[in-house]
Image (cartoon, rainbow, N blue to C red):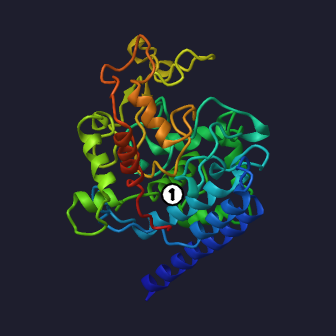
């Protein structure tokens, strides 16, 4: 009986977090959206906050998932609220969702979205879908865990422009968060638990069961169009896309120089800025292709507006520079092959528990 009571209490806390999160999100809409983005953003957030983020063990096209335990799920829900709450920012104006919005594949419709005070960084927010399988995070790979990644935007002058210590203090003084941390961690809010909560939420952002997955698994569902099938063939053969966009998440989690933004000032040297290894000049992490139709504009600087423009970029063989990846060469695709490859990329949009 005691176990049942605890379980019911935990579930009531979870649902309370979701409802309170909805109020917070509506009261503090994300900044930096396109002109019609505020209403769309709020509608997407309300839909997102109304769903259960528990993950099934099997996600077609992806490795099997170990479902969250109840305590783990409480951390997911706490992380979800924090993700949409501007309390993490210095002035209470900006949240993680400002730059990683649900309807844009948890990326941004802007090339470089503004952070606190309108400050602009250098890079486009990468999609957060399927980062639970990531081995390197950020475009330059400076974090190897989601927990480490989760805290860095708080201290970035171009993002939330605060410090982790200050954010922890604000959360600790909040009317509700201290009790939520107690329920989720049996501990007070601190740096470590803050990172775990946000990272737990990010691990629930899974995209799977795309038309490509259903075709590849020969399930008989969601047959591809002829153009999509041709695009899959180009991806695997003439296009050579699989060399870097490999594995179930369509990313090798490695770093490559394709020449994007090469020659522009100020020059962004990517992985080199972290490792100081000359071989890493201009290398950036391979992004997942899952939900790629949702997450434009593209590349680390958001400089390529559409999927067709991405195809054209690689068809030209990238941008020549001393560190260009040896696998980047002109593809010489026909017009129809370009259309087919774009259609294949669109067919990688998956199903989500929040849809």
Front residue of this view, candidates 135 and 183: 135
| Residue farthest along the left direction in this orientation | 218
Residue appearing at x 30%, y 24% in the figure: 327
Residue bearing mark 1: 201
State the image quarter where residue 135 is shown.
top left
Left or right of 106 in this view: 26: right
| Residue farthest along the front direction in this orientation | 335
State the image quarter where residue 214 is shown.
bottom left
Q: Considering only vertical position in the picture, is 264 above or below 339?
A: above
Q: Position of residue 193 (x, y in %)?
A: 54, 52
Dot 1 lies on which element? Answer: helix
Left or right of 120 in this view: 308: left
Q: Considering only vertical position in the picture, is 202 above or below 164?
A: below
Front residue of this view, candidates 148 and 231: 231
Left or right of 313 in this view: 66: left
Q: Position of residue 44 (x, y in %)?
A: 62, 64
Front residue of this view, candidates 259 and 49: 259
Q: Considering only vertical position in the picture, is 174 above or below 89?
A: below
Residue appearing at x 24%, y 41% in the figure: 236
Q: Residues within 10 Å of mark 1 (few under 14, many from 20)?
A: many
Q: Position of residue 30 (x, y in %)?
A: 71, 53
**Where does the N terminus fall, quadrant-wise?**
bottom left
Left or right of 27 in this view: 256: left
């Amino acid at each position: 009986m005691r176990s049942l009571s605890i379980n019911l209490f935990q579930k009531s806390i979870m649902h309370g977090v979701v409802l309170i999160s909805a109020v917070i999100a509506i009261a503090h809409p994300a900044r930096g959206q396109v002109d019609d983005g505020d209403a769309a953003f709020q509608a997407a957030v309300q839909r997102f906050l109304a769903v259960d983020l528990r993950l099934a063990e099997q996600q077609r096209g992806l490795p099997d998932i170990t479902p969250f335990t109840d305590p783990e799920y409480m951390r997911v829900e706490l992380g979800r609220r924090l993700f949409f709450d501007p309390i993490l920012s210095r002035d209470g104006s900006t949240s993680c969702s400002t730059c990683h919005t649900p309807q844009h594949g948890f990326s941004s419709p802007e090339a470089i979205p503004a952070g606190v005070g309108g400050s602009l960084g250098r890079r486009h927010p990468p999609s957060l879908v399927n980062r639970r399988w990531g081995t390197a995070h950020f475009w330059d790979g400076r974090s190897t865990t989601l927990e480490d990644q989760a805290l860095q935007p708080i201290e970035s002058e171009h993002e939330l422009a605060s410090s982790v210590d200050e954010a922890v203090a604000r959360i600790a003084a909040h009317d509700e968060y201290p009790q939520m941390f107690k329920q989720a961690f049996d501990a007070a809010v601190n740096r470590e638990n803050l990172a775990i909560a946000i990272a737990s939420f990010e691990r629930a952002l899974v995209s799977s069961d795309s038309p490509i997955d259903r075709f590849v698994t020969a399930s008989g569902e969601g047959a591809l169009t002829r153009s999509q099938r041709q695009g899959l063939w180009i991806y695997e053969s003439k296009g050579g896309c699989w060399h870097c966009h490999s594995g179930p998440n369509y990313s090798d989690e490695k770093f490559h120089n394709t020449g994007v933004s090469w020659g522009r000032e100020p020059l962004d040297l990517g992985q080199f800025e972290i490792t100081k290894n000359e071989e890493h000049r201009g290398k950036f992490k391979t992004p997942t292709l899952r939900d790629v139709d949702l997450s434009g504009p593209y590349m680390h600087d958001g400089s390529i507006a559409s999927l067709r423009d991405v195809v054209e970029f690689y068809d030209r063989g990238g941008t020549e520079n001393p560190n260009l990846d040896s696998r980047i060469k002109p593809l010489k695709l026909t017009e129809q092959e370009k259309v087919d490859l774009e259609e294949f990329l669109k067919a990688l949009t998956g199903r989500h528990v929040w849809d």
